Image: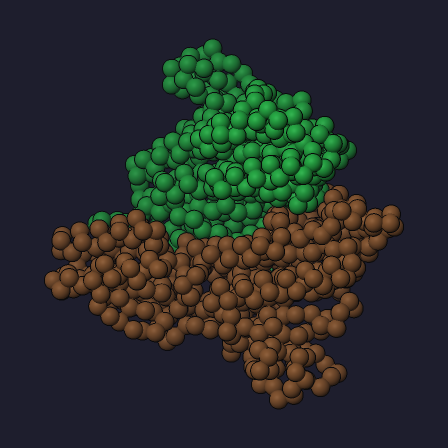
Chain colours: A green, B brown
Amino acid sequence: MLQSKLFTKTRKEAPKDEVSKNAQLLIRAGYIHKEMAGVYSLLPLGLRVMNKINDIIRHEMNTIGGEEVFLTVLQDKNLWEKTDRWDDEKVDNWFKTKLKNNTELGLGFTHEEQLTALMKDYIRSWRDLPIYAYQIQTKFRNEIRAKSGIMRGREFLMKDLYSFSKDNESHAEFYEKAKQAYVNIFNRIGIGEKTYITHASGGVFSKYSHEFQTITSAGEDTIHICEKCHIAVNAEIKGETLACPICTNKDLRQEKSVEVGNIFNLGTRFSEALDLTYQDENGEKKVVVMGSYGIGPGRVMGTIVEVFADEVGIVWPEEIAPFKVHLILIGNDKADVKKYTDDLYQNFLDKHIEVLYDDRDVRPGEKFADSDLIGIPWRVVVSEKLIAEKMTELKNRKTGDVKKVNEKELLNLLVS
Amino acid sequence: MLQSKLFTKTRKEAPKDEVSKNAQLLIRAGYIHKEMAGVYSLLPLGLRVMNKINDIIRHEMNTIGGEEVFLTVLQDKNLWEKTDRWDDEKVDNWFKTKLKNNTELGLGFTHEEQLTALMKDYIRSWRDLPIYAYQIQTKFRNEIRAKSGIMRGREFLMKDLYSFSKDNESHAEFYEKAKQAYVNIFNRIGIGEKTYITHASGGVFSKYSHEFQTITSAGEDTIHICEKCHIAVNAEIKGETLACPICTNKDLRQEKSVEVGNIFNLGTRFSEALDLTYQDENGEKKVVVMGSYGIGPGRVMGTIVEVFADEVGIVWPEEIAPFKVHLILIGNDKADVKKYTDDLYQNFLDKHIEVLYDDRDVRPGEKFADSDLIGIPWRVVVSEKLIAEKMTELKNRKTGDVKKVNEKELLNLLVS
């Protein structure tokens, strides 16, 4: 798209009350807008990144048999009383509201209750199982403090998948598939190397749950890493000596980290409370076994900013960058240079290369600074001097490498 | 997709408390789930339809220069006090909630205030205008009654675009473009013929606003149609004799209808209250001129069900149907019939034809009844008898026309 048509502009300063690096950079570069602490709107560039993250997540969820739904924000109190999660003493981050007739409603902070109740319409027999349903929907959590930018919001997008299986064995089989799908997601999104499957407390139904923790100094968690097995243990697990659950190694490296995903064996906690049962092969009534599988796309986006940003701005991995190429025109006042760059822009579009074209009539220094801040993976500069040499200048945002290439080489490099 | 993998099933009866035809049919066919009055979740089939409607809307909004954003649900009371729309006496359908420190928040029922305030960061000069920003986001309206199914929800998706222009002339130019884009949308979605541009009260800044009203007996509005000009007047316009605003014809036909879209000249109502100004070409401070442009995709979906459904079920226009083809296998127990149908299914997929394949082991009568209820435009039946004749049976859901065609003819007909 033409940058002159993009309504956002970069800013030198983030709002004074914004203390997190991810939100500071995303606001300055025009990706998000801060409405209040922990509540951020997505602007055109931010929505592009979010959609790319969501599409990767969707693809991997569909691959393991996930069916996408879109549940509601408004929650029926009766359901949550059945699982004993309505009371503010039990769940301390509810946002609640009321109908005109004073009926209390909640704003969903998670969706186990609602989906379990919904499945009562569709699960009768063992033949109906398993079911894997997921959504990408806004969650609301009434956090007392919200100082981590889009890494911990009061209103935020969440992908949550819930599995419904006939027994523990069938559940365990899917649980492993989901774990692998999560590994795929974080690899594709570009934080695979820095993300560790982390053993955390498992609750009543299994010894461990599994978190996906990404190393960053901005994280609120602490994990203990076994480098050999590329896994970790969450420091929250108490009452046992910290050791690698695979190789029993006790020499673990401690790191600050952020939880970008988690998978959890829910057992029959919700299906029992809400009476979600089925008839098995022998006509006997059994309780459905459930699991939950969450990823916060906004938290992932914030984490990526924290992990990869440098002193001049954001650095996006290519798969989730808002555009692949940032095309910079130097010499708006020179008709032939403008024409050459317009044509190159069209060439990129024809080859389905996503490009942001900085056609604005501003100083080159401003264009370069904006480009560094916005963080698109490949910067292509066109100027009168470069055209005279039959060259363009290609810069890799991540490595900083700059080289001159002719147009044919440029297109070959960027199409692949 | 394989129907055996779809977790929803059809139902003979809708919930007893559901009085609207659209929700009854959509629930029975497995498109939506009723959480409470006016609050419906989208199930896999329903989400597919909604995404298709949204994609058509997006395409037309992008074509007229719209930039997509995603604003938040949670609203800052201070903004709404500035426009005098916070008080429950002034706006009677707020849902409100609170932070832990008792700060009151609203759940957005519309987004003029929030987006106008946001634009103060980006609009300084006449060079920054015009800006057209839109979103597809959930709205919350605390309706006292909610008996129209997904045509009037308490929680529902809305596409809302807001225009920011430097003067009335520039505003008027875009307003006409938006009007045409809306005509395109309703044509593409399949309700163009039944939808009338309707003159309604315009407020302070213009004589008329424009609604898009679709004729249906389920509608809550009444319009007066000039058939010659294919436009209408909303009965709400009082104090003047009802006449066609174009040809002044007074012989108008009265119909019940539902408002599927509206466009509105906001003038400086919000920009003045929130101090959204710019410097014009002469360095003078001017107030931005705004417009709003809404469509409820869920209301559109409900309207289409109301308008086209027949006594046996839903009838989707092809552009927004969840699938183009419903492939019905008769004879699950016959290996060669199953093999032939599996191959045909793969053939459809290879040709990028969206197909729901009823591979379930249930009676033919049940498959046919489900197919009628679900309302996919083309039903293709394969059976032992048809294979012997080297034929398949093709049925048009809308017209009821049935004919036998061989596989080559079938694929030719459905690819186009």
Give how far across and how far down residue A130 sits, in percent: 32, 45
Q: Residue furthest bottom?
A: B251
Q: Residue at x 58, y 52 (%)?
A: B62
Q: Is residue A202 left or right of residue A282?
A: right
Residue nearest the viewer, comparing B81 with B279: B279
Q: Quadrant of residue A254?
A: top right
Q: Residue at x 35, y 47 (%)?
A: A131
**Could you tell me which quadrant the C terminus of chain B lies in?**
bottom left
Q: Is residue B138 left or right of residue A244?
A: right
Q: Residue at x 77, y 55 (%)?
A: B166
Give how far across and how far down residue A39 sits, in percent: 66, 42
Residue nearest the viewer, comparing B413 with A213: B413
Q: Residue at x 36, y 40 (%)?
A: A64
Q: Residue furthest top?
A: A251
Q: Quadrant of residue B210?
A: bottom right
In the displayed structure, B22 sits above or below A54; it is below
